[in-house]
């Protein structure tokens, strides 16, 4: 328990990093659905809700939000 929030934080951070490197970056979800990389963690968050309906949605959403904040530079770990 708690690993999904950490995974979503990492995915949020990586999606922002990918968007910073490439202007037109697409993520291939499940091998057939092309979506912008910045929206991929949000869609995976929805799948987490569908697969495990009794999970802590606030913690998962907070993890994703923290990953996005870390990616854009609002949460600096080391200067």
Image: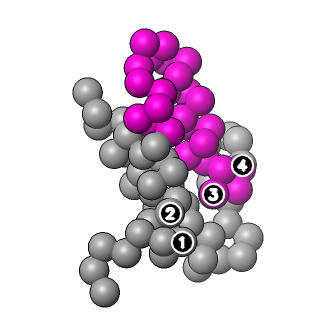
Q: Is residue 67 above or below residue 1?
A: below
Secondary structure character of the magenta stretch overall = helix
- The tag on residue 37 is 3
Cα distance in 3D space between marks 4 and 3:
9 Å
* Residue extent of the magenta highlight: 35-61
x 55%, y 27%: residue: 47
Q: Secondary structure at mark 4?
A: strand
Q: Which residue is mark 2?
A: 69
Foreground mark, 3 or 2, reads: 2
Q: Which residue is mark 4?
A: 34
x 48%, y 47%: residue: 64
x 62%, y 70%: residue: 19
Q: Secondary structure at mark 1?
A: helix
Picture coordinates of residue 73, whole percent (x, y): 48, 75
Where, by quadrant of the figure, is residue 24 drawn?
bottom right
Crowding at label 1, few (<14), some or many (≥20) Cα neighbours within 10 Å? Answer: some
> Mark 1 and mark 3 in contact (Cβ < 8 Å)?
no
Q: Secondary structure at mark 3?
A: helix
> Mark 1 and mark 4 in contact (Cβ < 8 Å)?
no
Q: Secondary structure at mark 2?
A: helix
Q: Is residue 78 left or right of residue 38?
A: left
Which of disc 1 and disc 3 is earlier in sequence?
Answer: 3
Answer whether residue 14 is visible to the viewer in this image.
no
Which of disc 1 and disc 4 is earlier in sequence?
Answer: 4
Picture coordinates of residue 37, whole percent (x, y): 63, 57
């Amino acid at each position: 328990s708690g690993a999904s929030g950490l995974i979503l934080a990492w995915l949020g951070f990586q999606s922002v990093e990918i968007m910073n490197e490439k202007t037109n970056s697409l993520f291939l979800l499940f091998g057939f659905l092309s979506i912008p990389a910045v929206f991929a963690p949000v869609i995976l968050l929805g799948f987490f809700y569908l697969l495990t309906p009794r999970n802590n949605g606030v913690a998962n959403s907070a993890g994703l939000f923290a990953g996005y904040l870390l990616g854009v530079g609002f949460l600096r770990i080391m200067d």
